[in-house]
Amino acid sequence: MFTLISKRLIQLLPTVFFVSVIIFSLQHLLPGDPAMIMAGEDNDPAVIAQIRAQYHLDQPIPIQYLFWIKGVLSGNLGESMRLKVAVSELVTTKLPVTLQLAVMAMIIALVIGVGLGILSAVYKGRALDSLVNVLGLIGISTPNFWLGIMLIFLFSVELGWLPASGYVSPFEDFWQSMRTTIMPAFVLGNAIAGVLMRHTRGAMLQALSSDYVRTARAKGLSERVVVIKHAMRNALTPVITLGALEFGTLLSGAVLTEQIFTIPGFGKLIVDAVFNRDYAVVQGVVLVTASTYILLNLLADIGYILVNPRLRD
């Protein structure tokens, strides 16, 4: 097991390197000159030259990359050209917001998706199975922006139960934090619930038709024990990998939802940085997001190994 995990870690190193190169290179394809934007309306050539020298924008792109990656390896993601704040400080401030949103969305997705997937498999061919499949298809097909707007209209405008926008930290007011994040979390978790439901249903159907399940039934075990103890435990193994990858998607794909609900997380941070041509912020946020996604993939592999003893040899 240790050898397999070590191989996975070694394989991740070139992946992280190429991701960093791509992130840095693509950022420079954006139109506009950040030095001129920072200089303001005066466009003083001396000021522009000073800004370019300060942020190494006057150097060739490979040299700029070396300066940047040297800072990253030492824990320095650079400084926001517009806000004059360290990117690591911005990440530390915004990441917990998106992380809270992603965790809540993942919990919603797991409860709905896995639960309905198991029910759909157990009651295959019945009315409940058809209803669950329809709900899963609706969840996958519903656009996040439309669902978010409809939830705001219903629960904020019409009923007045929840705030339409804003964010409160759970350390300041836990219940108010839940009220401000439950709608965006449901929007994000809705589509993932549909995906998890389909995968869980397929894995459960395969498990329920396997020999060890038929043997368990032949021994006289109750259907509840057969489903929970024998079928579900083995069926959820591939869901672990899918869940980890989807969690990474939540961290990187909450841009539109955070904009709709005015959540000050990674999504709003990177949108503002792109519009302001704030290279350091865009590079730092995307690098952290990509690294987190890669790490989650590794954790999914480890989890898969832990629950599947056949892979430990």
Image: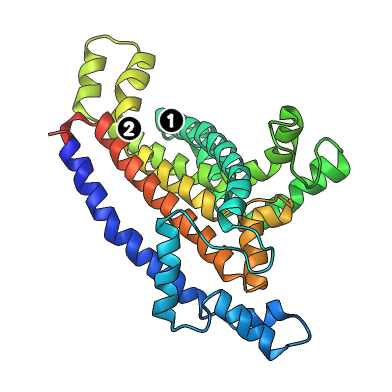
- For the residue pair 286 and 126, the one nearer the viewer reads as 286
Residue 241 in sight: yes
**Colour scheme of the picture:** rainbow
Helix, strand, or loop for circle 2? helix
**Residue at the image point whose x is 23% and y is 52% from the top:** 10
**Residue at the image point whose x is 60% and y is 57% from the top:** 86
Residue 199 horizontal/vertical position (percent): 40, 42
Count residues near mark 2 (Cα–Cα under 10 Å), then give few for <14, some for 14-19, many for 20+.
many
Q: Which residue is under mark 1?
A: 118
**Mark in the foreground, 1 or 2:** 2
Name the outermost residue toward the top.
Answer: 220
Label of residue 235 in the image: 2
Q: Is residue 107 above or below residue 286?
A: above
**Residue at the image point whose x is 47% and y is 75% from the top:** 26
Question: Disc 2 marks which amino acid?
Answer: Ala
Q: Earlier in the sequence, mark 1 or mark 2?
A: 1
Q: CA distance from mark 1 to mark 2?
A: 9 Å
**Residue at the image point whose x is 75% and y is 80% from the top:** 40
Q: Is residue 28 above or below residue 162?
A: below
Quarter of the image with the N terminus is top left
In this rendering, position of residue 152 left or right of residue 217:
right
